Image (tube, rainbow, N blue to C red):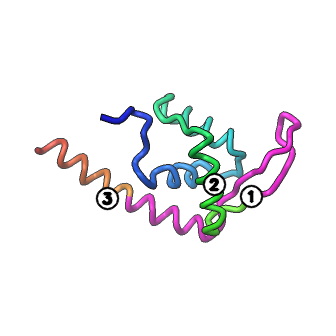
Amino acid sequence: MGKPTDLVQGTLDLLILRTIEHEPKHGWAIAKRIREISNDVLKVQQGSLYPALYRLEKEGWITGHWAVTETGREAKLYALTSTGRSHLQREVAAWERLSGAIDLVIQQA
């Protein structure tokens, strides 16, 4: 059986989009926020995070721009685009359907 931190295929994109829904964040802050919200269960590695950010940017769902962070370092901040916001809404609805169906099977099987 997989480790609890293994993410279902495609779930990382959903988590990233949701994490930057309200304010832009740099990669490290995205990973940190996901870890914090999940009570240290989901730990996104850089080897997974940055290719996902690149892919999301290429799809047009996020944009990235360089800025100085609160610590005075330069980092690329990622923000949700309007296309990304629409995609996120569809993905959240799909996730809710899927997780609800899985829960039904677990509870009733």
What amino acid type is highlighted by mark number 1?
A: Gly
Q: Earlier in the sequence, mark 3 or mark 1?
A: 1
- Is disc 2 in contact with disc 1, using a CB cutoff of under 8 Å? yes
Quick one: label 3, few (<14), some, or many (20+) residues within 10 Å?
Answer: few
Quick one: label 2, few (<14), some, or many (20+) residues within 10 Å?
Answer: many
Say which residue appears at 71% left-offset and 51% top-offset: 24
Tell me the magenta residue range. 65-94
Q: Position of residue 48 (x, y in %)?
A: 56, 45
Q: Position of residue 81 (x, y in %)?
A: 66, 66
Q: Earlier in the sequence, mark 2 or mark 3?
A: 2
Nearer the viewer's eye, disc 2 or disc 3? Answer: 2
Left or right for 25, reference 48: right
Left or right for 78, reference 72: left
Quick one: label 1, few (<14), some, or many (20+) residues within 10 Å?
Answer: some
Badge number at residue 53? 2
Q: Is residue 55 magenta?
A: no
Q: CA distance from mark 3 to mark 1?
A: 31 Å
Q: CA distance from mark 2 to mark 1?
A: 9 Å
Which residue has dot 3 on it? 97
